[in-house]
Amino acid sequence: MQKRLAYLGIASLFLLAANASCLAQSGADLYQSKCQMCHAPDGSGNTPAGKAMKARPFNSPDVMKQSDADLTAVIKKGKNKMPAFEGKLTDAQIASLIEHIHTLQK
Ligand code: HEC
């Protein structure tokens, strides 16, 4: 009996560790779950939703010239058809998303 309890304890520790790694989601994972249905995996906006809403490619000059602060503002407050993510994403998550966007601008 005691042994079984010990196993249970170890199993729940593993579960906790798995949960913690979900919280530390990378920008790429977040992008995949929350952004790519409009912006496309490569940031081109080449998806049915992205085309319908006129999402510009992240590597277009108009987006390239925006500072990280500008991009953060769009993600937080939204812009035209771009939904606002303030309150849904933490500042750290938005920062990691912007890092991911920069990898798509190359
Ligand atoms: C429902 C579709 C949709 C989703 C989901 C979406 N976006 Fe957008 N996004 C848009 C559209 C449309 C624009 C263009 C807004 C405009 O300038 O009119 C845009 C613009 C942007 C811009 C500014 C680039 C520019 O064109 O000036 C950034 C940065 C951005 N989105 C990041 C994100 C991130 C990060 C996520 C996920 C957390 C996300 N978007 C989710 C539709 C979406």
Image: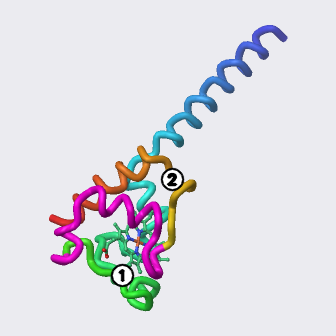
Query: Label 1 is placed on what type of residue?
Result: Ala
Residue 3, image x, y percentages:
76, 10
Q: Does the residue labelled 2 lie within 8 Å of ligand 1?
A: yes
Kindly identify the residue that appears in the image at 72 percent across and 13 percent down.
Answer: 6
- On residue 55, the disc is 1
- Above or below, 75 against 96 in this view is below
Q: What stretch is highlighted in magenta?
A: 60-82
Q: What's the coloring here?
A: rainbow
Vertically, is 69 above or below 55?
above
What kind of secondary structure does the magenta stretch mostly adopt? helix
Residue lying at the far top of the rendered structure: 2
Q: Give 9 or 77, whichever is nearer the viewer.
A: 77
Q: Residues within 10 Å of mark 2 (few under 14, many from 20)?
A: some
Q: Residue at x 43, y 75 (%)?
A: 79
Q: Where's the C terminus, which quadrant? A: bottom left
Q: Foreground: 102 or 86?
A: 86
Give the numbered dot on residue 89. Answer: 2
Residue 36: assigned label: none
Q: Nearer the viewer, residue 42 or 51?
A: 51
- N-terminal-most mark, 2 or 1: 1
Q: Which residue is drawn at 31% across and 56% down?
A: 98
- The amino acid marked with disc number 2 is Leu
Residue 89: horizontal and vertical position, in percent? 51, 53
Quick one: SS at disc 1? loop
Query: Would residue 55 appear left or right of 33 to someone viewing this image?
Result: left
